[in-house]
Each structure stands twice: as C-alpha cells, then as structure tokens.
Amino acid sequence: MRHATIIGTGSYAPDNTMTNEDLTKLVDTNDEWIITRTGIKERRIATGELTSDLAYEAAVRAIQNAGLTAAEIDLIICATITPDSFMPSVACIVQDRLKAMKAAAFDLTAACTGMIYGMVTAAQFIETGMYQNILVIGAETLSKILNWEDRSTCVLFGDGAGAVVVSSTEKESGMLSSNLLSDGSKQALLSCPAVPLNNPFTKAETTNFAPSITMQGQEVFKFAVRSITENVKAVLKKANHTVEDIKYIIPHQANLRIIEQAAKFLDVPVDKFYLNLEHYGNTSAASIGIALDELVQNKQIQHGDKLILVGFGGGMTSGAVLLEWD
Ligand code: ACO
C-alpha cells in the first residue's frame, strides 16, 4: 500500500510589510484594537507581484528542500481564490516557469481550507499509484480583493504562498488520516463575487466591477471554532490517536482568539497550536503551508512527530490531515 508523505516544504511572502500603524492611515483603526481582537501585528502586501509569482517562489523552495528537480514532479495543484486570471490557471503558469515538463496542473478553490483540500487530493493520486511526486501550493494575493475602506476586513488579511511536495512511500507513515467537510448553506458568511452575467440577453448592472471580500465576523468566528474542534477530533479518531500523541496542531492562521477558543474546546494547551499570524495576518490558502515551512526550517519537527493541519474557510469549507513526519 502506498502512502502520501511530505518530503519538502517551501514558502514565500512579499518583502513589503504593512504594520497595524500603517493601516491607521487608511481606516479608522488602531494597533491595540487589531492586536486584542486578532493577534495580528503586521502582514505582507504585494507590490506588483502576482499570485503566480508568490506560488512560483514557494514551489522552487519546496522542490529544492525535497531534493527533487522540477522534471520529477507529476502534478501541480494550486489552491487559490485569487488567481492571476480565470485562465490560464496559476498551476499552469507555475508549471511553465518551473519547466516541470511532465506535470499535469490545475487550480483548486476551497478558500482558506485550500491547502488541506489540495493535500488530500494529492494523496488520492498517490494512493492509487497514479503519481509519485505532487507539488501542492497555497498562494494568495488577497490584497487585490479587499475593500481598503472597510476596517472590519482589510486589517485581517495578507499575501503569501506556501508549498509542499507530497510523495509516495511504502512506509506506514505520512498522512495517517484526513477529513474534509463543506456547508454551502453558510455561504453568505464569507463571500467575494466573480464577474456578473453580461451577454446579449442579460446586461450587467455595472461594468465597473471591483469584487471584494464581505464577512459576517462573529458567525465566521463560531464556525471556525466548531470546525477546528470537529475536524481535529475526526482525524484523531480515524487514526486511532489521542491529542496527547500530537506534537503540533497547525491551524489556518486566521485569528488568535479563534485558536484560543478552539484550544479550550479541545482541552489542549494553546501552545500546542503553532502560530505565526502576528507576522502574516490571514493569508487564506497559503497560511498552513507558510506555518509548516517555518516549523521545518526552524527544525522544530523531527522524524516520527505527529502533526495535525486543520483549515476552515469560505464556502464554507473545513478539513484536517493527521501526519507522521518522515
Ligand atoms: N478597528 C477598530 N474598530 C473596529 C474595526 C477595526 N479594524 N473593525 C470593526 N471595528 C468596530 C466595529 O465597527 C464595532 O464598532 P461599534 O461597536 O461602534 O459598532 C466594534 O469594533 C465591534 O465590532 P465587531 O464586529 O462586533 O467586533 P468583534 O469583536 O466581533 O471582532 C472580528 C471582529 C475580529 C472580525 C471577529 O468577529 C472575528 O475574529 N471574526 C472571525 C473572522 C475571521 O477571522 N475572519 C477571517 C477570514 S475567515 C477565514 O479565514 C476562514
């Protein structure tokens, strides 16, 4: 039986750092409000880089850390809600820049759960024996779909990319269990429209269209806490593990208070959750990959450590994977 395991990680964020103080020049907010409500101190905001540029840089690092060449990648999956274009996909742009000549490539949309959906999708191709090495990227330039006059959303998000190389192993390690959920009935909690219908039969109300994220913050908060709790419990149960077996839970980095509440519900110390949101804000599909790469680069994960990656986001979607690190 083949198992899916992570053999390399990479991440990248634009150099440009925007602090809470910088935001006070745009909207009526302050450092204290943002830190106490969210835990975020600063975020990276792209200045000219596209989602595919961030994705490419994270991908290069992940492939290098995996000890592979791009020619050995069989499939590229890019999770994003902020692609450069409807077509080509970000995954195809990255495939071209990497010269990953034998790779298939597609984008996947599951908002902030994108990295988890991408990893579980990759695992299916590996477990069936179809592919050996799959690059999964989460990449976003959320800054282009923010309303920079809406203080309730623009302070929360940032740009960045995280990537992993998922490969086939004969060992009984790697991805030990996974769980994916969706609840479209709650779609209004977090949304961002695409281009409206505009054809000879239906005229769009406006051609001056600038989509931006809208959010029902408190309802998203409750959904997030419930989702973390439910998905962590599900992957533990499926893998026949207890939370004591887990070294780190790496959550989607949305908000410190969400994580504190989830830690309470799960009855685990909050420092079991790895957090770096104070420096990046919420980077949607990129956040789990960036956090995982940071842990790997800091040598905080050793062979045999068990990790849970857990995401939640627009759709609404949520999911988790439980990994044993090779
Ligand atoms: N600065 C200062 N004041 C603000 C700001 C701001 N940036 N934003 C809102 N306020 C004000 C509001 O206008 C309101 O003022 P009022 O009482 O005079 O009307 C007051 O602060 C309280 O607003 P609430 O929305 O009730 O604040 P709340 O305590 O719920 O915190 C927050 C808002 C942080 C968004 C919270 O609801 C939350 O964490 N929700 C989770 C949402 C989240 O993390 N989303 C990320 C995307 S989702 C994802 O990744 C899956």
Image (cartoon, grey):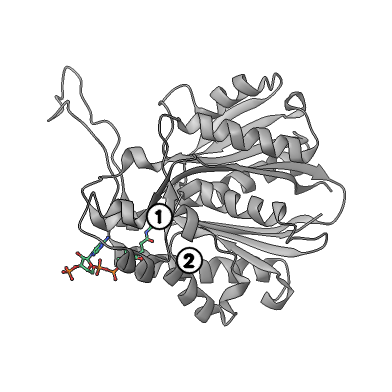
Residue 45 appears in the figure: yes
Please identify the quarter of the rendering in which residue 299 is found: bottom right
Mark 1 C-beta to ligand 1 under 8 Å: yes
Which of pointers 2 and 1 lies earlier in the amino acid sequence? 2
Residue 196, given in percent of the width and then of the height, sits at: 23, 31
**Ligand 1 quadrant assignment:** bottom left
Label 1: which residue?
316
Q: Which mark is residue 227?
A: 2
* On-image quarter of the C terminus: bottom right
Looking at the image, which residue sits at the far right?
170
Mark 1: amino acid: Met
Residue 188 appears in the figure: no
For the residues bearing labels 2 and 1, Cβ distance under 8 angstroms: yes
* In this picture, residue 207 sits left or right of residue 118: left
Q: Secondary structure at mark 2?
A: helix
Callout 1: few (<14), some (14-19), or many (20+) C-alpha neighbours within 10 Å?
many
Residue 211, given in percent of the width and then of the height, sits at: 26, 38
Residue at 65% across / 63% down in the picture?
A: 308
